[in-house]
Image (tube, rainbow, N blue to C red):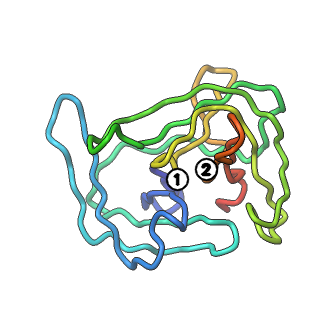
Amino acid sequence: FIYTNFQTGKSYIVTNRHVVAQADYATIEFQYSEKPAVKFDNCPIVAVDEQVDLALIELPSDANLSKGLKIRESLPEEGSEVITAGFPGVGDTPSWQFGQGVVANNSVFDKILVGNSTIGAIQHTAQVDAGSSGGPLLVKNKNGEYEIVGVNAWKIKDRESANFAIASKALN
């Protein structure tokens, strides 16, 4: 998803480290329903966090994209509604996917998920499939606008609806 640093005006793609593992550059493509796709080649991967499984890809300064969603640092309450957004596709065809669920546990500290970090993972029941990694975990604020509270990263295959996102405060 797009993150814009409002102090510098630079825009980035936030994703998981495991999505861009061992790469120095990435190709980013935005598909629109009413206009041609826009593609950016050789976007540098400018930050990688090995412990928390996060990465930042810098977009060109002339990308002229809409600003990203607001990132909320406070944890969502357990039982609150969350929405996942991802791009897992159907077969070989890229396809957006949105899922709806609830926060099951807002502070999971498991070494496999977050290493020794003091920032936990958010366990939720919203749909996450292969290809959803790096997508945002969203909540609606009191004005009805979406805010990012996490970065979807993992799911436990032998449990139903046991999905995990890295809490957004890790993005600082």
- Can you tell which quarter of the image residue 49 is in? bottom right
What amino acid type should be assigned to the residue bearing mark 2? Val
Along the horizontal axis of the image, is 158 left or right of 78?
A: left
Locate residue 56, reporting x and y percent: 50, 66
The residue closer to the viewer here, 30 or 5, is: 30
Taking 99 as reference, is 108 left or right?
Answer: right
* Label 1, residues with CA under 10 Å away: few <14, some 14-19, many ≥20: many
Kindly identify which numbered label has been placed on residue 134.
Answer: 1
Mark 1 lies on a secondary structure that is: loop
The numbered dot on residue 98 is none
Residue 81 placed where, x, y %? Answer: 70, 25
Residue 96 drawn at (x, y percent): 38, 35
Q: Which residue corresponds to the image point at 54% horizontal and 61% vertical from the top-left?
A: 16
Identify whether 15 is placed above or below 83.
below
- Return the disc, 1 or 2, that comes first in the chain's sequence: 1
Res. 141 image quadrant: top right
Q: Which residue is mark 2?
A: 151
Whether 17 is drawn above or below 7: the answer is below
Expressed as whole percent of the image width and height from the top left, the position of residue 80 reads 77, 26
Q: Residue at x 78, y 70 (%)?
A: 115
Badge 1 amino acid: Gly
Which image quarter: residue 82? top right
Residue drawn at 27 percent across, 72 percent down: 42
Asked if the residue at tag 2 contacts the one at tag 1, i.e. Cβ–Cβ closer than 8 Å, the answer is yes
Q: CA distance from mark 1 to mark 2?
A: 6 Å
Direction front: furthest residue: 158
Q: Which of the image's four quarters has the C terminus?
A: bottom right
Left or right: where does residue 98 sit relative to residue 39? right
